Image: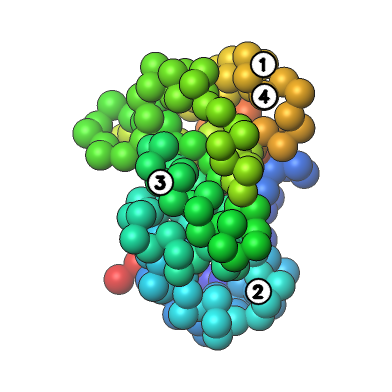
Amino acid sequence: MLSIAQNIAHVRKSIPQGVDLVCVSKFHSKETILQAYEAGERLFGESRAQELVQKYEALPKDIAWHFIGHLQRNKVRQIVPFVALIHSVDSVELLSEINRCAEKSGRRISVLLQVHIAQEEQKFGFAPDELRQFVAEFDESKFPFVSICGLMGMATFTDDEEQIKREFSTLATLFAEVKSAYFSENEVFATLSMGMSEDFPLAIAAGSTMVRVGSAIFGERS
Ligand SMILES: *Cc1c(COP(=O)(O)O)cnc(C)c1O
């Protein structure tokens, strides 16, 4: 079996300069995460608030913790004091709660809007037209404690590469459209989070600026 450091070196070969790697460490132990940390990684992604809090408390403080899973409103308060980026904002209600908790914490929280691009049933994420409507109606002055930094999406879980490429290019096109229509003056809107272990090279080819890689680094999750 290859070590985590070897897995990282292998994954990094396919990631050009300028594309960020988020090591998705959900369900893996603190010791396992430390191996990736010692190999030089500093961005880690988790999908459960409680697990994220415990790992944040136990691990080095120069880790930037990303929240990548579905976030319930009643969990926002737990992660806002330290989270570096929330990838999964999919409603105005969730954004309002993040804004409210951020104010209390004295922080400004960076977020991505999650877009539903896959064919398969997904419960979470804006449909492309919902996203267009959301950004068209978005009133920045009502959310002074959040920064919308870009979009996140997941392709269908399939062997059909053409379909995956189509979905990533749909998201990249939507990202460019929304950026030029609503965020052209805003340099912070610059992150396109797409690509996981099975498909990150396709995502990068389509314009991803941030990939979220779990099993290719840490092995299968139990
Ligand atoms: C689990 C997860 C990943 C990582 O998946 P792998 O296939 O293990 O790389 C990426 N993004 C999200 C949103 C996830 O929930």
Q: Nearer the viewer, mark 3 or mark 2?
A: 3
Task: Specify the label residue 37 is tagged with.
Answer: 2
Q: Pick whichever of labels 3 and 2 is earlier in the sequence.
A: 2
Label 1 with label 4: CB-CB less than 8 Å? yes
Up-down relation of residue 69 to residue 95 (above or below): below
- Circle 3 or circle 1, nearest the eye: 3
Residue type of the residue flagged with mark 2:
Tyr
Left or right of 18 on screen, residue 37: left
Residue drawn where x is 63% and y is 14% of the image: 181
How far, Cα to Cα, is label 3 from label 1?
25 Å
Q: Secondary structure at mark 3?
A: helix
Residue linked to disc 1: 180
Q: Which residue is mark 3?
A: 94
Along the horizontal axis of the image, is 8 left or right of 93? Answer: right
Residue 201: name its quadrant. top right
Residue positioned 59% across, 65% down in the render: 105
Q: How many angstroms separate mark 3 from mark 2 (CA)?
A: 31 Å
In the image, the residue with mark 4 has its CB under 8 Å from the nearest atom of ligand 1: no
Label of residue 68 in the image: none
Instruction: Say whether disc 4 or disc 3 marks the residue closer to the N-terminus.
Output: 3
Q: Nearer the viewer, residue 62 or 132?
A: 132
At numbered mark 2, what does the secondary structure look like: helix, strand or loop? Answer: helix
Q: CA distance from mark 2 to mark 1?
A: 36 Å
